[in-house]
């Protein structure tokens, strides 16, 4: 099921979901995992790009992930004519607001604004809720405008929140998930799909991060080597002055 809806509102990043106290799970991403980034790019263009754009990311930048321009054009360019174009979406902000109540945000820097853990947990915690307009809800971002666009992969899930009081009288919440219908993927396969998608979203926010880190390491090593020579020269200089 390709190019479905994606629309989430921006809100401050927190270590826990503010409305429910649901603890975020650590995203098992690796920025240097090229296979994961390629898979995430494929999921992004198939499920996200119909509603969300990435206007600061060009298709041909995906050559940094080991893809040729021919591969990009044949498999990933659906909303543009040339690989040199940015990942824009045809939906206007006006149409998005009319359909969802809010224009779907651009996802170029969503990995930096939300954080990998928030995105990873968010995309794995949708559940059926007949009270919402879309029929979906999310425990991390309650009443989000975005329906569960990956539900055909994960299947439909239900959620029961049980409120309990501990010995001190403080209220705690227990989250009981249930599988209402099976998806195309197993639970493990779906987690891997989300991991790859989040990995790519984080990559888009700062494509040069890995190369910049590598350059930084080299610079520090060079500076360390120069320090050794400078210190040796300083000792030799002061030795001559003492005599």
Image: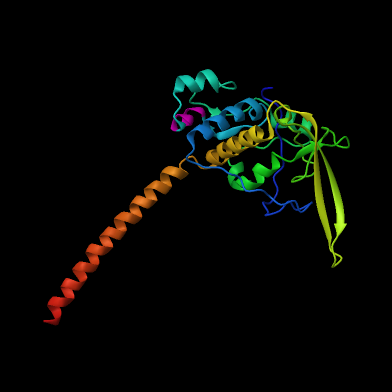
Report the magenta stretch's main SS.
helix
Where the N terminus falls, by quadrant?
A: top right
Q: How many marks?
A: 0
Q: Estimate the x, y position of residue 58 in percent, counting from the top left.
A: 51, 30
Q: Is residue 141 left or right of residue 57?
A: right
Instruction: Confirm whether residue 108 shows in the render.
Output: no
Q: Is residue 8 above or below residue 38?
A: below
Residue depicted at 34% across the width and 50% down the height? 218
Where the C terminus falls, by quadrant?
A: bottom left
Instruction: Out of 104 and 171, give the one closest to the viewer.
Output: 171
Q: Is residue 55 above or below residue 73?
A: below
Instruction: Out of 223 and 97, give the one closest to the viewer.
Output: 223
Q: Estimate the x, y position of residue 123 in percent, counting from the top left.
A: 69, 39
Q: Estimate the x, y position of residue 120 in percent, counting from the top left.
A: 65, 42
In the displayed orientation, state which residue is furthest to the bottom. Answer: 242
* Residue 121 figure quarter: top right
Residue 60: in magenta span? yes
**Which portion, as a residue range, is magenta?**
59-64
Residue 9: in magenta span? no
Q: Is residue 16 above or below residue 241?
A: above
């Amino acid at each position: 099921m390709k190019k479905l809806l994606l629309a989430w509102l921006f809100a401050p990043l927190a270590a826990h979901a503010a409305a429910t106290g649901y603890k975020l799970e650590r995203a098992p991403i690796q920025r240097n995992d090229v296979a994961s980034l390629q898979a995430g790019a494929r999921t992004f263009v198939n499920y996200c790009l119909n509603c969300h754009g990435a206007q600061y990311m060009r298709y041909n930048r995906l050559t940094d992930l080991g893809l040729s321009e021919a591969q990009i054009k044949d498999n990933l360019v659906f909303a543009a004519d040339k690989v040199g174009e940015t990942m824009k979406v045809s939906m206007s902000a006006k149409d998005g607001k009319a359909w969802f109540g809010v224009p779907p945000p651009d996802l170029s820097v969503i990995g930096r604004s939300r954080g990998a853990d928030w995105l990873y947990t968010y995309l794995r915690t949708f559940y059926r809720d007949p009270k919402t307009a879309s029929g979906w809800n999310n425990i991390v971002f309650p009443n989000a405008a975005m329906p569960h666009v990956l539900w055909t992969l994960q299947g439909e899930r239900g959620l029961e929140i049980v409120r309990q009081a501990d010995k001190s009288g403080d209220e705690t919440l227990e989250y009981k998930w249930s599988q209402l219908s099976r998806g195309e993927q197993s639970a493990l396969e779906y987690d891997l799909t989300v991991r790859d998608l989040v990995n790519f979203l984080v990559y888009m926010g700062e494509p040069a991060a890995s190369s910049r880190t590598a350059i930084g390491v080299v610079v520090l090593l060079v500076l360390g080597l120069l320090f050794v020579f400078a210190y040796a020269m300083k000792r030799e200089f002061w030795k001559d002055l003492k005599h």
